[in-house]
Image (cartoon, grey):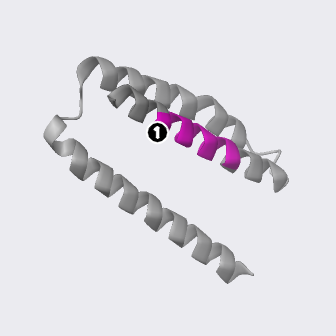
Amino acid sequence: MQAVQLLLISVGLLLAVAIVAARLDALELVEHRGPKVLLGIVPGVIGAVLILVERLDVIPDEAEGDLWAMAMIAISTVAILGTSVRLARR
């Protein structure tokens, strides 16, 4: 089950990075290296974390429930702040 969870998390992160990179590219920030750096470094970091979690079992089983709750709260907070900032700019 942990492998499926890690797969879903990594796919979600990669999709988020791809969306952010596409949005930055659409904003005509071609001179900046931000989108290319995101697309280069983030998948490597995600791969390294996946291997470490699978091999070393870095996250203790008793802490997984709390970490999932904290991750969902953090993701929701970032999404709400991002939406608020975007609406405030209009």
Question: Please, which residue is most extreme toward the top here?
Answer: 55
Which residue is pictured at 23% across the width and 48% down the height?
65
Q: Amino acid at mark 1?
A: Ile
Q: Is residue 23 left or right of residue 76?
A: right
**Snapshot quadrant of residue 87:** bottom right
Which residue is pictured at 55% across the width and 34% down the height?
42
Between residue 83 and residue 65, name the one nearer to us.
Answer: 65
- Residue ID for mark 1: 9
Between residue 21 and residue 9, name the one nearer to us.
Answer: 9
Count residues near mark 1 (Cα–Cα under 10 Å), then give few for <14, some for 14-19, many for 20+: some
Which segment did they paint magenta?
8-19
Question: Please, which residue is most extreme toward the front here?
Answer: 1
Q: Quadrant of the N terminus?
A: top left
Q: Is residue 69 above or below residue 88?
A: above
Q: Position of residue 73 (x, y in %)?
A: 37, 62
Magenta region, main secondary structure: helix
**Snapshot quadrant of residue 70:** bottom left
Q: Is residue 81 left or right of residue 38?
A: left
Between residue 3 and residue 73, name the one nearer to us.
Answer: 3
Which residue is pictured at 24% across the width and 29% down the height?
58
Q: Position of residue 35 (x, y in %)?
A: 70, 42
> How many discs mark residues in the rendered view?
1
Q: Quadrant of the C terminus?
A: bottom right
Q: Is residue 86 above or below residue 31?
A: below
Q: Position of residue 47 (x, y in %)?
A: 48, 24
Q: Is residue 22 left or right of residue 3?
A: right
Q: For numbered disc 1, what is the local secondary structure?
A: helix
Residue 5 magenta: no
Which residue is pictured at 45% across the width and 64% down the height?
76
Q: Is residue 2 above or below residue 17?
A: above
Q: Position of residue 41 (x, y in %)?
A: 57, 31
Q: Is residue 65 left or right of residue 12?
A: left
